[in-house]
Image (cartoon, rainbow, N blue to C red):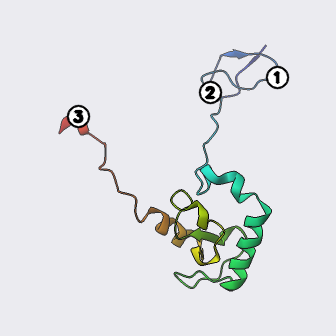
Amino acid sequence: MRYCISNGCTSLVEEGTYYCADHKPRKRKRDGFQSTNKSFYRTDEWKDMRSYVYQRDKGVCQCCGKFVFGRDAHVHHIEPISERPDLKLDEENLILYCPKCHAEEENKNKKKSPPTIFQKYF
């Protein structure tokens, strides 16, 4: 038995663990654009098409004109896969964006919910 390594905690934990149940780090959930289509984005067909769109657009964001490369080069589906799965590999449905412009485009049609702070007081 040993003590939890969290600052000031006096709880005992078993060998092989470092934190007690109160201080055990929680896994962060990553938000991504392709969470429901992850298997599609790992296919060779998608990787080839993504490379083609990058070369076609010459590595330049089609919204702001910024040069992007690597993970910052986001290929966006104009018609979402959820609405038009038949266009997921159509080159006319794909456009290159930087991360900032891609996030703005993805969130353009989402409605903003009113803040929930102090709702019980109003």
- The residue that disc 2 covers is 23
Residue 40: which disc? none
* Mark 3 residue element: helix
Mark earlier in primary sequence (1, 3):
1
Please state which of the two labelled residues, at mark 1 or mark 3, is closer to the viewer: 3
Q: Quadrant of residue 77?
A: bottom right
Q: Residue at x 60, y 49 (%)?
A: 36
Which of 109/32 is in front? 109
Q: Residue at x 82, y 23 (%)?
A: 16
The Cα atoms of the two marked residues, 1 and 3, are separated by 45 Å
Quarter of the picture holding the C terminus: top left
* Mark 1 residue element: loop
Q: Residues within 10 Å of mark 3 (few under 14, many from 20)?
A: few
Residue 120: which disc? 3
Q: Residues within 10 Å of mark 1 (few under 14, many from 20)?
A: few
The amino acid type found where label 3 is placed reads Lys
Q: Quadrant of residue 34?
A: bottom right
Which of 56/64 is in front? 56
Q: Quadrant of residue 27?
A: top right
Quarter of the picture holding the N terminus: top right
- The residue that disc 1 covers is 16
The Cα atoms of the two marked residues, 2 and 3, are separated by 31 Å
Along the horizontal axis of the image, is 113 left or right of 47? left
Please state which of the two labelled residues, at mark 2 or mark 3, is closer to the viewer: 3
Residue 20 drawn at (x, y percent):
67, 21
User: Do the numbered discs 2 and 3 sit on residues whose CB atoms are within 8 Å?
Assistant: no
* Mark 2 residue element: loop
